[in-house]
Image (cartoon, rainbow, N blue to C red):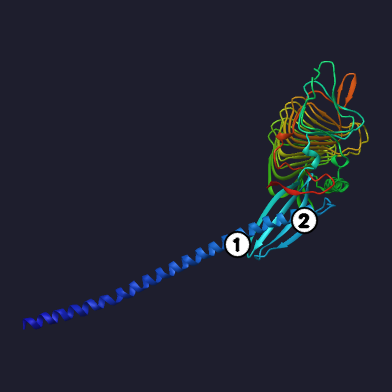
Amino acid sequence: MREKSILRLCRDFALHDGAFALPSVLMLVTVLSLLSFAVLELLFLEHQLASKEISQVKAQYAAENGIAYELSHLSAVTELGFVEQDSTYLFADGSSSRVRVHPWGAVFLIESQGVFKHCMSTRRATIGCTPHEAFENALVLGNSSHQLVFTGDAFVNGDVAIGPAGVTTGSLYGHSTPIILPIKGKVKRLKPHECPQCSNEFLRGINHYYDYLMESLHRQEQSRAVHENSRGSFQGDSVLLLPGGGVLNDSVFSPTQRLFIASIGPVCIGPRAKLRGLITVLSGDSIKTLPGADLQGTVLVSKKSIHIFGSHLASVECLAGRIWLDSGTVMKYPGILLSLPTDSVAAGSQQITIKAGVLAEGFLAMLSPSGDDALILEAGSSLTGSVFTQNRLTLDGTLRGSAVAEDLFFYEAPSTYLGWMRSGTVERALLPRGFLTPPIFDGVRDFRILEWL
């Protein structure tokens, strides 16, 4: 009897335990199923994320490849106008890029949008070209009618290309006379092809660009409202119109869209102004910056003159008839100063002057039909880069690079001295590798990235 009771008790316990086991198993199966789905979902999301990252990288590479292809195309064009161009490139991996080239001061702005599947990437850069072979020398003088004369502390470290009159030393009151020729390099006979010629196509293009900006400014000025500041459009670009004589003293940033700050009258950039990005300051009169102004990536275009007073310029271009960099100014590579012909036919209507106390890096050029205009590097100034002028060059400062000029010149009352060099130094070996110039010369151009934006 007792044994039967124990058996019945065990049977009842087994039945009771089985009733609880089934829901437990079902719950365990459910949890394992949810966990499996979560793992699969995580793996799927990781795959999607990796696939998107790969697509984004391919889109970025497509944008960069588009720029590389466009540079190769531009380098093969013998007559390159200063106009906007559009190109589309398709690549073997299924990606593509649309490339647009804009005039940007004296160089070009290139924008490339790479596409792969649903991903897009945009790269921007300014492009210049490798220097003309003449700039392999320290000094090139195109005037063959007289000698190159050294006096005082003048010194050239590098090759000199000169006409048949050659090089000598001379005596000048107030300056010591060198015992030997102060040239550490070869003195070469200037060959006809060695003196670069400015490209007529470039001049026509940049004059068109210059005139287009001015015409657009006049149209905007005529159509603007009564408000002191108003906005308009240069073919889709943003424009901020300023009153003549107004002072720009704000921080302005435009990293991806071209912005024109324009005035029919003079423009003053104040000491608290900070301009960053794709900004062009355009004046139908003159532009000046006051000490403390900070500009980066800006293009300054003036109908008459640009005067920089003790400002900080990084990747800045200045285009005008007359340009001054005053003491205390710092100009960082790739700085460009370009003196262009003006409407005036008076002597001295064009000029570039680098004052004592200026530290500059970049390319200086004067394109002038007159023989009286001068590009002046004062004693105490420092330029790392290259200089080109179709006219006279006063070389009294320190040049770490090379100079190509029609003639050397300075004035000491009551005389003008042509072909003389009295105190400047040229150190060709100190020109940094990879230095680029605007595409202003005839011949083969090798376009390269000037600066990524």
**Label 1 residue SS:** helix
**Label 2 residue SS:** helix
Q: Residues within 10 Å of mark 2 (few under 14, many from 20)?
A: few
Viewed as shown, does residue 117 lie left or right of 46? right
Nearer to me, 120 or 20: 120
Residue 106 pos. (x, y %): 79, 44
Residue at left 37%, top 73%? 30
Q: Toward which corner of the image does residue 337 lie, by quadrant?
A: top right
Q: Amino acid at mark 2?
A: His
The answer for how far apart the CA atoms under marks 1 and 2 are is: 26 Å
Residue 234 pos. (x, y %): 79, 51
Res 67 label: none
Q: Earlier in the sequence, mark 1 or mark 2?
A: 1
Q: Residue at label 2? A: 73
Res 55 label: 1
Viewed as shown, does residue 318 lie left or right of 314? right
Q: Amino acid at mark 1?
A: Ser
Nearer to me, 165 or 117: 165
